């Protein structure tokens, strides 16, 4: 069905608006390619470890790098031109801001309900809550260990807890109201690499560790975890010591938008899909996903497509999989070094990725990348990711006014 037929069916009521939106999103995501017309201003001087797109407007892209700097880019095109650059509208580095992280920034996250605040953490053991407008920290929480990851619940109404994963073998819960850690979740036997709150159950938390285990918690009863994920679906869910989720470190986690499933990625080059209610391994074969980083990579999931898509970094590429079938839909190539993170924009159906090559790339649907005729300047042809007119190598650059 082409777009015209789909619009006609929508107008006549043959398909509902939700189905129409889902179909269009799926079609656009399946045509993602490196954008020729949109690029993010290159402002990082070190490898990019983490990015996050605000959930309120889908407009501001937050990024943190290995030199301790944090950058904010505006990804909304307000120029009216087909080709534009996402400008850097905020910068926190050692030269311009004395509150900058001393060492590598490992995780950044926008406050779920407001773009006026964001959180950052890193190797200096500091979890910082920033005023995005003033670009100064409103509060700083010191954690007992180098921080690999943190996460604030997107839907919590009864608490303001931030889960923190660090080199310590427990999960710390920092309360934004008091500005200190209030709980410690102890069951892991090694460093915790990733934490994630459920988007539906506000007290449910998942944690992955260097001990190869993936634990599910109810933070109201922090003495022990609810269960441990077992990759073999054995009978040892309650026995934390005997179950492993991966044959390597569990360094990346993400829930689906409905909270029914949890996806984990490990250094054993495997990605697994879990039932978040029962802890069952759904046994989906996604193939081999190569991971060079031991600290973890950040992947994302589309909630507006049918089926849902998983965007996961694999060395210098980004692999796109169907969530429930494991079918690989695409491999996005464009970075020159290891890809560390990616973030999906549901408003624009675009993907942003960060890498150790210090670049943030934009992946847009192929249909949107078709070159349009410019009535003002028809002779200018634009090359990939460049604002300069493309010139062939054999073209004579010499000119003369002589007849």
Image (tube, rainbow, N blue to C red):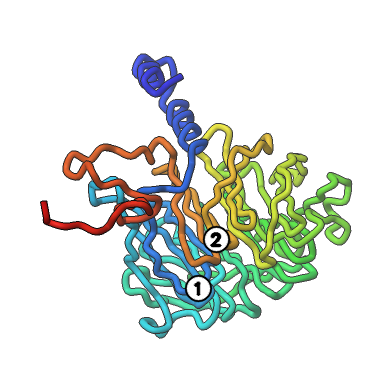
Residue 393 x %, y %: 38, 54
Look at the picture and state if 75 lies above or below 21.
below
Q: CA distance from mark 2 to mark 1?
A: 14 Å
Residue at image coords 58%, 50% = 318
Residue 383 x %, y %: 37, 50
Look at the picture and state if 369 lies above or below 106.
above
Residue closer to the observer: 32 or 166: 32
Q: Is residue 232 visible?
A: yes
Residue, disc 2: 336
234 horizontally vs 61: left or right: right
Give residue 397's quadrant in the image: bottom left
- Give the mark toward the camera: 2 or 1: 2
Residue, disc 1: 46
Look at the picture and state if 154 lies above or below 281.
below
Q: Tell me if mark 1 has few (under 14), some (14-19) or many (20+) residues whose alpha carbon lies within 10 angstroms of its own.
A: some
Residue closer to the observer: 33 or 111: 33
Residue at image coords 57%, 81% = 124
Residue 240 x %, y %: 83, 59
Residue 109 x %, y %: 49, 62
Q: Is residue 153 visible?
A: no
């Amino acid at each position: 069905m082409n777009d015209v037929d789909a619009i006609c069916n929508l107008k006549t009521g043959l398909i509902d608006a939700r189905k129409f939106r889902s179909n269009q999103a799926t079609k656009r995501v399946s045509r993602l390619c490196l954008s020729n017309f949109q690029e993010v201003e290159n402002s990082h001087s070190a490898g990019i470890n983490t990015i996050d797109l605000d959930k309120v407007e889908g407009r501001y892209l937050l990024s943190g790098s290995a030199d301790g700097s944090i950058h904010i880019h505006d990804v909304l095109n307000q120029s009216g031109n087909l080709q534009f650059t996402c400008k850097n509208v905020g910068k926190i580095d050692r030269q311009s801001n004395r509150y900058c992280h001393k060492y590598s920034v490992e995780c950044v996250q926008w406050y779920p309900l407001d773009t006026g605040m964001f959180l950052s953490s890193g190797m200096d053991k500091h979890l910082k809550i920033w005023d995005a407008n003033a670009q100064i920290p409103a509060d700083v929480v010191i954690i007992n260990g180098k921080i690999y990851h943190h996460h604030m619940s997107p839907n919590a109404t009864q608490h303001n807890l931030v889960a923190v994963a660090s080199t310590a073998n427990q999960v710390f819960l920092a309360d934004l109201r008091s500005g200190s850690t209030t709980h410690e979740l102890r069951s892991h036997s090694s460093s915790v690499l990733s934490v994630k709150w459920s988007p539906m159950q506000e007290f449910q938390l998942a944690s992955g560790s260097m001990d190869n285990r993936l634990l599910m918690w109810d933070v109201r009863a922090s003495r022990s975890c609810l269960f441990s994920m077992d990759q073999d679906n054995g009978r040892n869910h309650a026995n934390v010591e005997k179950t492993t989720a991966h044959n390597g470190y569990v360094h990346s986690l993400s829930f689906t938008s409905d909270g029914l499933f949890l996806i984990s990625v490990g250094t054993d080059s495997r990605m697994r899909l879990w039932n978040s209610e029962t802890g069952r391994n759904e046994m989906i074969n996604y193939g081999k996903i190569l991971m060079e980083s031991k600290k973890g990579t950040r992947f994302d999931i589309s909630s507006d497509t049918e089926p849902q898509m998983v965007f996961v970094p694999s060395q210098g590429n980004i692999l796109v999989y169907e969530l429930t079938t494991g079918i690989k839909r695409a491999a996005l190539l464009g970075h020159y070094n290891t890809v560390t993170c990616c973030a999906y924009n549901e408003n624009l159906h675009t993907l942003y990725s960060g890498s150790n090559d210090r670049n943030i790339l934009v992946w847009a649907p192929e249909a949107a990348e078709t070159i349009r005729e410019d009535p003002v300047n028809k002779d200018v042809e634009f090359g990939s990711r460049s604002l300069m007119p493309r010139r062939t190598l054999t073209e004579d650059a010499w000119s003369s006014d002589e007849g």
